[in-house]
Image (tube, rainbow, N blue to C red):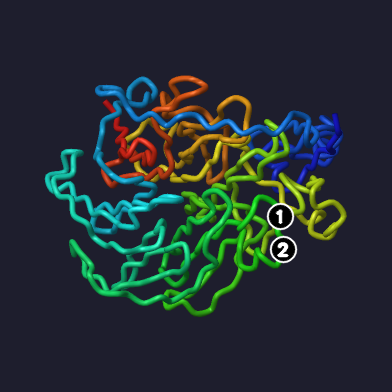
Amino acid sequence: MRKYQMICLAALAFAWGCNSKKEKEEAALTGPDSVVTVTDSLTLPAPFATESVENRPEEAGWPDGKTPVAPEGFVVTKFADKFDSPRWTYIAPNGDIFVAESATRKSADRITLLRDVNKDGTPEMREIFLEKLNKPLGMLVLKGYFYVANTDGLYRYPYKDGETKITSKGQKIVDLPAGGYNNHWTRNLLANADGSKIYISVGSASNVADHGIDEEKRRANILEINPDGSGERVYASGLRNPVGMGWAPVSNVLWTAVNERDKLGDELVPDYITSVKEGGFYGWPYAYFGPNEDPRRKGERPDLVAKTIVPDVPVGSHTASLGLAFYNKTKFPAKYHNGAFVGQHGSWNRSTLSGYKVVFVPFKDGKPSGKPEDFLTGFVESEKKVYGRPVGVTVMNDGSLLVNDDSGNVIWRVSVK
């Protein structure tokens, strides 16, 4: 097995209790085949240690009366169903719930509005809010506009609070590179606290720059723009497929969930969630999980390999970790406060299935404080069949959690008993 040196960064040493100089030196010398992360050491196998396989289970749908499974003390209910691939949910400041229905191939290309008028946990109103889009995902209400991130561009529409339908054409304020490997067509949106900046996540066009780096212009990045579309710059790069984004409570640091590369074996490369450093480079396509060079890009950019930032929290290889939501309410038990929920869409490039669940990462004082743990499971019937595939995760104003199941065409609600 190829050996990897442990990387002990000063910022991470604190989280591990490496308080003294001696402790830091000792930490750097232990576990020569490990990588330090905020929550655990991680042993990475050699590339191609196992054969790369294609393993796609049947997406069977949910039998009547069956639901995903949450921990003791929670209840899982069907919030809404009969969608056409409900991939993402956004909750507007007024509590309206917007669902982006979009898919890789045959796509509904619409946004549906749900409104829980009497606040009983079930939406009484359901309307098609916006249609004839192009693979929409990210949504945002900001300063009198409704923003939609289509795969080929960011659009905004004049919007009044409480509107139930938009029929205007809208304005394309940013062109975005369209298409992409597997599901890298998704574009997510997030505004900062004062609404002065918008962040757009754009995944790579290929697995590992398979057709040359020129095809990847403005991709594998988080972009920052002004609300009118001007002032674009790359906020962070080398992020193969960043989708979920959120501001960590307490620290107010930007975090993202990243779907890492394929075809290096069952255990490479771990998907991750990570804090995002302004101007930071996270390795793609030249390196993975720190300065571990991808053999398919060997020798091309040693300078970028050397500067690759180690991500914070590994969440399993090939899990397709896409959704990210910080629990900023108090309805759930205290252990969940300020932690992160991660929607794992599930593997296709692993001999045994991984993902197909929602995991939870505890946080304390704005930093991860423990390993990922299962939160919502039961999506897998067998190695050959799954009931559904979770993607987006969204914290509701009442403190419950919505989970988008785009394969099952359901949005699940998780609440306390």
Tag 2, which secondary structure?
helix
Residue bearing mark 1: 210
Residue bearing mark 2: 213
Q: Position of residue 7 (x, y in %)?
A: 79, 42
| Location of residue 400 (image quadrant) | top left
Q: Which residue appears at 23% of the width and 60% of the height?
A: 129
Q: Which residue appears at 75% of the width and 38% of the height?
A: 35
Q: How many angstroms separate mark 2 from mark 1 (CA)?
A: 8 Å
Q: Quadrant of the C terminus?
A: top left
How would you rate the neighbour count of disc 1 (Cα within 10 Å): few for under 14, some for 14-19, many for 20 or more?
few
Q: Position of residue 222 (x, y in %)?
A: 57, 61
Q: Quadrant of the N terminus?
A: top right
Q: Amino acid at mark 2?
A: Ile
In the image, residue 267 above or below residue 276: above
Q: Amino acid at mark 1?
A: Asp
How would you rate the neighbour count of disc 2 (Cα within 10 Å): few for under 14, some for 14-19, many for 20 or more?
few
Q: Nearer the viewer, residue 147 or 83?
A: 83
Q: Position of residue 261 (x, y in %)?
A: 66, 45
- Left or right for 182, reference 124: right
In the image, residue 42 above or below residue 382: below
Q: Which residue appears at 28% of the width and 59% of the height?
A: 93
Q: Nearer the viewer, residue 211 or 380?
A: 211
Q: Residue furthest front?
A: 106
Which label belongs to residue 294?
none
